[in-house]
Image (cartoon, rainbow, N blue to C red):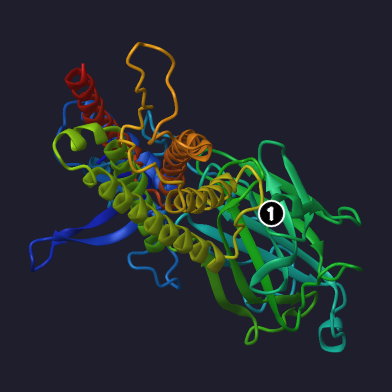
């Protein structure tokens, strides 16, 4: 399990010590990103030492009892060999050869994890909410008013909010902010951290494309900004005013519709995961402490990626359509001479039409499924960006398929005396120039034939590229194995059969 890609990408869990009544182990905790990396590294290390079956380890970490996950996610601090055990003292140093443990500062703001109710000094008071499980994403914040009396008197009391967004993964840009029409991201105002550029800036969101994500036109109004990343965590921190002129406010009295996103990598682009959090801020007033313990808290969370089952069906349908059926349809046309010589003059054409019609129907179904899946998560469809090239090429393919089908249905027919091999007639008995006779192709037919073939080749090439990028995107989104080799196995197999048949056909003709 430490060598198989799908197992590595889907992560690991700790099983119960005892078996259940059915003889099977139960699920105890799910490991976080660091736990997965460290546990896998230890298992490979143990394997090199000669232990080839069975694996145990001692994992040290914490989980949040208030989060109803089954099994809960363990935030791992250390991983040791099983001999260490949980009863005795823990080693002071990590196991050699394992990745470094996560930073002790994450995901804590100002060195304090939880709010101590009744504190009147607001310094360091922090509350934390988990907004996604896998990968684990947490939001910590401190909201402090300027005026002790402001909470009761002001409609929009002002103060500072210090926020920390923690991604338990060592790759990906991260961002969060306020939605002007929650849970939609447009319009929105967000803070985005780019680890490679060490950049933390405010951005205005005017559209779902990258061109609609622009640095705030009225300048940056953040303080205490930071973005740090190691092999296991990415942490964004910033401080801003609750209320800023010309900006969407954080409301101390009402629910706040917050939005967040995580990128595929550290370069700003289309998000891999995103969602929304409806949150009543826990407000601290200097000299009084927390003033709204009964009203504040986590209201709801929306964590979105395109629905896996829909995109999985989309992927499989189009792999079959363009990896299996389309090559077979082309093969029936290329090998039509064999059908004709065997006395089945029309069978090749019937197979060709049936398979191409099926490809058209499956392509249309797959196109609609992808459109619906992306629409449900408010994602870009066809605007040209680096992240939407798959969608844009899909639209181009769909248009060309319509053109190719219409091109086939309304084709200029061959003259009655013409053979299916489309060879020009020559009734000159003395070897002179060929002269037009019954069966000569029209000019329109002569133009149609190569154009039909060229468009077919273009469609096939685009579709193979599309299926390949689709498998890659799906495996990235859902931590699944990339089975692109299945496409190429079908293509090579069918291509080999067609090649053998074509050689045989030419040999028989000679």
Residue displayed at 80% across by 77% down:
287
- Quadrant placement of the N terminus: top left
Residue 67 visible in the shown view: yes
In this view, the residue in front, 476 or 266, is 476
Residue 410 percent across, percent down from the top left? 46, 53
Residue 425 percent across, percent down from the top left? 36, 27
User: Which quadrant would residue 166 be assigned to in this image?
Assistant: bottom right
User: Is residue 171 shown above or below 144?
Assistant: above
User: Which quadrant would residue 291 be assigned to in this image?
Assistant: bottom right
- Quadrant placement of the C terminus: top left
**Is label 1 in a helix, a strand or a loop?**
loop
User: Is residue 351 shown above or below 464?
Assistant: below
Q: Which residue is mark 1?
A: 209
Q: Is residue 313 left or right of residue 240?
A: left
In this view, the residue in front, 364 or 342, is 342
Seen from this angle, which residue lies furthest top? 431
Residue displayed at 19% across by 37% down:
339
Q: Is residue 119 left or right of residue 276?
A: right
**Total number of numbered discs in the rendering:** 1
Q: Is residue 308 left or right of residue 380?
A: left
User: Is residue 230 shown above or below 246?
Assistant: above
Q: Is residue 382 left or right of residue 340?
A: right
Residue 466 percent across, percent down from the top left? 47, 43
Residue 2 visible in the shown view: no
User: Which quadrant would residue 5 be assigned to in this image?
Assistant: top left
Residue 23 percent across, percent down from the top left? 8, 62
């Amino acid at each position: 399990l430490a060598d198989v890609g799908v197992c590595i990408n889907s992560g690991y869990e700790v099983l119960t010590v005892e078996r259940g009544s059915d003889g099977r182990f139960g699920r105890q905790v799910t490991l976080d990103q660091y736990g997965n990396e460290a546990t896998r590294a230890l298992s490979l290390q143990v394997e090199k030492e000669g232990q080839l079956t069975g694996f145990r380890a001692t994992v040290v970490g914490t989980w949040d009892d208030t989060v109803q996950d089954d099994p809960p996610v363990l935030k791992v601090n250390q991983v040791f060999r099983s001999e260490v055990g949980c009863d005795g003292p823990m080693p002071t140093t990590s196991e050699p050869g394992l990745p470094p443990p996560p930073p002790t500062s994450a995901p804590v703001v100002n060195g304090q994890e939880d709010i101590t109710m009744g504190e009147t000094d607001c310094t360091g008071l922090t509350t934390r909410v988990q907004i996604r499980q896998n990968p684990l994403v947490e939001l910590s914040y401190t909201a402090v008013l300027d005026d002790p009396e402001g909470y009761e008197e002001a409609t929009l009391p002002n103060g500072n909010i210090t926020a920390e967004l923690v991604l338990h993964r060592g790759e990906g840009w991260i961002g969060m902010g306020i939605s002007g029409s929650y849970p939609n991201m447009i319009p929105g105002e967000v803070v985005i951290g780019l680890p490679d550029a060490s950049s933390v800036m405010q951005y205005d969101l005017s559209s779902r494309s990258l061109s609609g994500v622009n640095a705030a036109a009225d300048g940056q109004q953040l303080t205490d900004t930071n973005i740090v990343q190691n092999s296991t965590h990415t942490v964004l921190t910033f401080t801003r005013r609750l209320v800023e002129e010309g900006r969407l406010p954080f409301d101390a009295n009402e629910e706040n519709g917050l939005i967040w996103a995580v990128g595929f990598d550290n370069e700003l682009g289309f998000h891999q995961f995103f969602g929304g959090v409806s949150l009543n801020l826990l407000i601290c007033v200097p000299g009084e402490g927390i003033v709204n313990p009964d009203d504040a808290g986590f209201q709801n969370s929306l964590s979105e990626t395109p629905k896996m089952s829909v995109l999985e069906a989309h992927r499989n349908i189009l792999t079959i359509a363009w990896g299996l059926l389309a090559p077979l349809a082309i093969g029936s046309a290329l090998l039509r001479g064999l059908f004709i010589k065997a006395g089945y003059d029309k069978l090749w054409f019937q197979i060709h039409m049936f398979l191409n019609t099926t490809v058209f129907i499956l392509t249309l179904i797959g196109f609609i499924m992808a459109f619906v899946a992306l629409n449900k998560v408010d994602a870009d469809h066809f605007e040209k960006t680096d992240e939407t090239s798959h969608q844009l090429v899909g639209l181009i393919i769909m248009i060309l398929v319509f053109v190719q089908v219409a091109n086939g249905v309304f084709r200029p027919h061959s003259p009655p005396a013409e053979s299916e091999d489309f060879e020009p007639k020559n009734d000159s008995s003395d070897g002179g120039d060929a002269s037009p006779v019954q069966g000569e192709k029209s000019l329109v037919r002569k133009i149609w034939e190569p154009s039909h073939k060229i468009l077919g080749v273009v469609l096939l090439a685009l579709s193979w590229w599309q299926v390949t990028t689709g498998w890659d995107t799906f495996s990235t989104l859902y931590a699944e194995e990339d089975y692109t080799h299945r496409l190429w196995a079908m293509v090579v197999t069918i291509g080999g059969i067609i090649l053998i048949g074509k050689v045989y056909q030419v040999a028989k003709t000679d």
